[in-house]
Amino acid sequence: MSDRAYIATRKGLFEVYRTHEAWLLDQQHFLGDPVSMVLPDRRDGTLYAALNLGHFGAKLHRRDAGSMDWVEVAAPAFPVKPVDSTDPVDWTVRQIWSLAAGGPDEPGVLWAGTLPGALFRSADRGDSWQLVDALWNVPERAKWMGGGYDVPGIHSICVDPRDSRSVLVGVSCGGAWLTTDGGASWSLRAKGMSASYMPPELQAVQEVQDPHRIVRCAAEPDKLWCQHHNGIWRSVDNGANWSEIRPAAPVSNFGFVTAVHPQDGETAWFVPAEADSKRIPPHASLAVTRTTDGGKSFVAWRGGLPHEHCYDLVYRHGLAVSDDGQILLMGSTTGGAWLSEDGGGQWQTISTTLPPIYSVAFA
């Protein structure tokens, strides 16, 4: 059972630990610096923290298991842009937007998704990185566009636990892409999604979809969930086809985050917002919605969460689930952090005064 978690914020990385009575804030790291992503590597206990230092660029730090010291390692970086390139994108990593560990049979392998929308792979625990050229060079990338940022970005990296060479990534706005050969080739995986923000004749185009977040069920890897810019979608065939979730009871179509139960692909959590044009919780009351039947129905959980005058959003990586699916940690754009030990039914407050939270993860 998890007894430690991490909260990456605009002004540092914070640790949370469990006591006999409650979960409490503990150590702090990189105080004052924006930490865009945190990754605890379950394979060897290493902890990775990605920093976004603006003028000084994107940085990556590593802390080995049992150590209190952080070591700066290489950050993903583009090769020199060819002088004859017609690509309008600036080949400079603005931010490390996602980090994922490779499979258990690939010690040391890491994946990183960046702004702009590139995927990088490391085979040596972050000491060096290589741009995944095959994805960067797909012709469809010319249609990718920025969503919340002015450039596309890769925010979701789903490694298949059955086959480490099979990886699905989500791009805002660029759809979903799958490799089955470790990144040597890629195929679109957004069939069935629909983009209401596009002209009618372009709404079903796969490479313009804006999946805000895609997650995979570890125990049922073919089951994927997606919080899209304008709805919730689900796949039961590893992304080959997506079906929009239209439950009997209406839920918000807009939000950023989703999480799936590691052992049950029918159970997933979302944190709805009012609308694209009104990015606050519905009725200014924070809620976590949960389905346990594959999206046929949802229950909104508010116990312990702020009910009135609440304007918190939860970013794409702001909701984490423990391996047993019972403990949830959530962090908001206005520095609220809450934890549930009963699958989201009741929440305890960790803090309401943290900096804006970018990502959370269990050790």
Image (spheres, rainbow, N blue to C red):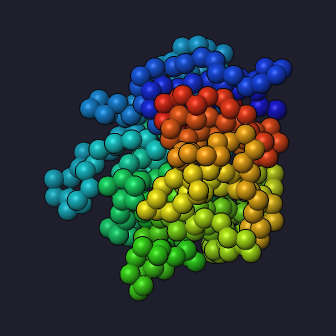
Whether residue 236 is visible, yes or no, is yes
Instruction: Answer left or right for 198 relative to 268.
Output: left
Residue at the image point whose x is 74% and y is 67% from the top: 295
Q: Nearer the viewer, residue 133 or 68?
A: 68
Report x, y in % for residue 338: 67, 36
Instruction: Answer left or right for 135 relative to 226.
Output: left
Whether residue 106 is visible, yes or no, is no
Q: Quadrant of residue 289?
A: bottom right
Tell me: residue 114, above or below residue 11: below
Residue at the image point whose x is 51% and y is 53% from the top: 280
Instruction: Answer left or right for 295 relative to 68.
Output: right
Tell me: residue 206, above or below residue 11: below
Q: Quadrant of residue 68?
A: top right
Taking the view exactly as shown, the residue that stands out farthest to the top is 68
Task: Tell me the quarter of the image containing the C terminus.
Answer: top right
Residue at the image point whose x is 46% and y is 21% from the top: 30
Residue at the image point whose x is 46% and y is 48% from the top: 113
Instruction: Answer left or right for 252 relative to 117.
Output: right
Taking the view exactly as shown, the residue that stands out farthest to the front is 308
Q: How many marks?
A: 0
Task: Tell me the quarter of the image containing the N terminus.
Answer: top right
Report x, y in % for residue 114: 42, 47
Q: Nearer the viewer, residue 70 or 78?
A: 70
Q: Nearer the viewer, residue 180 or 193?
A: 193
Taking the view exactly as shown, the residue that stands out farthest to the bottom is 201
Report x, y in % for residue 48: 54, 30
Report x, y in % for residue 201: 41, 86
Tell me: residue 152, above or below residue 314: below
Q: Nearer the viewer, residue 82 or 341?
A: 341
